[in-house]
Structure formats: C-alpha cells, structure tokens
Amino acid sequence: MVQSLRRYRGRFAPSPTGPLHFGSVAAALGSCLEARRQGGEWLLRMEDVDEPRCQPGAALDILRTLEALGFTWDGPVLYQSRRKARYQEALETLKNAGLAYPCACSRKDLAGAATALDGGPLYPGTCRHGLAPGAVSRAWRFAVDDRSIAFTDAVQGHYEQHLARDVGDFVLLRADGYFAYQLAVVVDDADQGITHIVRGADLLDSTPRQIALQQALGFPPADYMHLPVAVNAAGEKLSKQTLAPAADTGQPVATLLAAWKFLGQICPPELGDASLEDFWRWALREWQSENIPRRRTRMPAAA
C-alpha cells in the first residue's frame, strides 16, 4: 500500500443533484467502515462543482439522511463550490508547466471524433499546438502523455489505461466557466490529505486521469478501492436520472443492512431487530473488505 506510513484518511463525496439513494448509501457505508476499521478518519465533501446540475436543498437533505442513518464524520464538510480560487491556482500551475492549453473546439466540432473510454468524444488534439487564427478559447485541457497508467485497486484488481489512446486530452475548465470534476477532486483530495479513496466503480475509468493530475501537480498518490455500483434491472446505475428512490430513513437499520449485504457482507438474521447503535457497533467489528464482490456493477437484493 503506497500510504502505509501515513494515517488512514478516507472520504465520502456525494454530488447534491438529488436525495441520497441506495447506491450512495452503499458507497458511504463501505468507505466509512473501511476508514473506521483501519483506525482512520472519514471526511465528508459535497461535490457541487457542477453547480448547474445541483438541486437546491439537496446538500442539506444528504446531510440529514446520513445523520438519520447513524453516520458520523470528522471535521467540517467541504463544499467544492466555495473553492474556485484554489482550482484556479492549480490550473495556473499546470499552465505554467506547459501541461494545460486553451481549446476553441465546440461539441459540434468534435461530433465526428472517435469515442473515448468514458463514452464522450476522444479529443483529436486540434488545439494542442495552438489556436487556429481567429479562434477564441472556450475551455482549457490537460495535455496527456503518450503512456499507460496502471494501479492495483483493492477490489477490482489490476487496472491500466493508456491516456492518449483511451481518453485523450481532457477538460480542466469548461466552456461555461465551471471547473471540471477531474481537476477539482484531485485538488480536494490532496488538500484534505486523503490517503485512501473508496468509491463506486463507475469512477474507475477516471482514476488514471486523476493519477496523471496528481503527478503533474506534485501531489502524493492515494490507494483506491472501487466498490460495485448499484444498478436496476435494466443495468442502469441508480441515480436521479433513473428515478432511484430516496434512501429510507424511516427504517434506518433495514436500509443499512441492505447496503451491508450488497457489499457482500455476512448478516445473521437476528440483526434485523438491532437498534441503530447496535448495528454500527456490530458492523465496525465485523466489516471485511475482502468479502466485497469483485464486480463493477451489482443489483441490490431487493431489486
């Protein structure tokens, strides 16, 4: 483990685009229990950098849901929307190092590009060596190296990605003036001293880009654990877009037990009658990360 000499510090970082649903509860439970079992800290961050997608009141609703389910976290909640100056500072560092460049391309300009690993257009490098005469910068991109980045995930195993071939030069500052998630999350993890990142496997493909930014900015590396993502019967990730219901806080132990089972943990029948305090006491003692299914997606048992 690359952070073996540092105290474990993890985090849960939901996006306040709607209420907390089952998939988010499972990710929160896995990241929290892993941090606590390792004797570490567990921080909470609101990833509201994409402000147009955020729903008014959703951040407060998420906090209330976590509290109702018995989660506790260390320190104050960090909000990305309040850290734009810090992201700008990181972008300037990359500019000065010659690793970020302005891009004038619109979505229409990229309509014929190949498809990147994340489903978006694979940037063909149109503006990498300078803007065309008369072109106006719309965004800023990170100039990726022609190399592969590999790491070992604690659940998913060995993962390797060739940045230039698989994702291309990716956006750091969007055309609408908002900073991209990839930059914000890397800066936040470094500033918060996060040593271990436990999150959903839908972000596995983003990790090499984040490692590249860590290296470019001189940030320490982190260890990764990508949990299975909860999907519906159609194989779609549970989300606001797929009409995933809000987590049930009226029966907090039942909600947590469903997430516990989803993460491959063994559950004795009598635990269904436990109090919320008893559940957490038991879960902190019995959590076994090696039992997490080595899969990218999984349907909840009740689905």
Image (tube, rainbow, N blue to C red):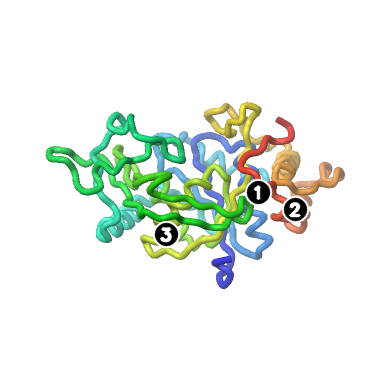
- Disc nearest the viewer among 1 and 3: 3
Image quarter in which the C terminus is found: top right
- Disc nearest the viewer among 3 and 2: 3
Q: Indicate the quadrant where residue 218 lies.
A: bottom left
Dot 1 falls on a residue whose secondary structure is helix
For residue 171, side relative to residue 101 (left or right): right
Rounded to the nearest angstrom, the CA distance separating label 3 from label 2 is: 33 Å
Q: Residue at x 47, y 34 (%)?
A: 55
Query: For mark 2, what is the residue?
Result: 283
Which is nearer the N-term, disc 3 or disc 2? 3
Tell me the amino acid under the disc marked 2: Ala
Which of the labelled discs sits on residue 29, or is there none? 1
Dot 2 falls on a residue whose secondary structure is helix
181 vs 133, nearest the viewer: 133
Q: Is residue 31 visible?
A: yes
Residue 232 pos. (x, y %) = 63, 30
Dot 3 falls on a residue whose secondary structure is helix
Q: Indicate the quadrant where residue 122 lies.
A: top left
Q: Indicate the quadrant where residue 65 lies.
A: top right
Residue 14 pos. (x, y %) = 53, 44
Query: For mark 3, what is the residue?
Result: 214
For residue 198, side relative to residue 264 (left or right): left
Q: Residue at x 22, y 49 (%)?
A: 129
**10 Å crowding of disc 1: few (<14), some (14-19), many (20+):** many
Q: Residue at x 36, y 60 (%)?
A: 216
136 vs 143, nearest the viewer: 143
Which is nearer the N-term, disc 2 or disc 1? 1
Q: Is residue 185 visible?
A: no
Which is nearer the N-term, disc 1 or disc 3? 1
Looking at the image, residue 69 lies above or below residue 7 = above
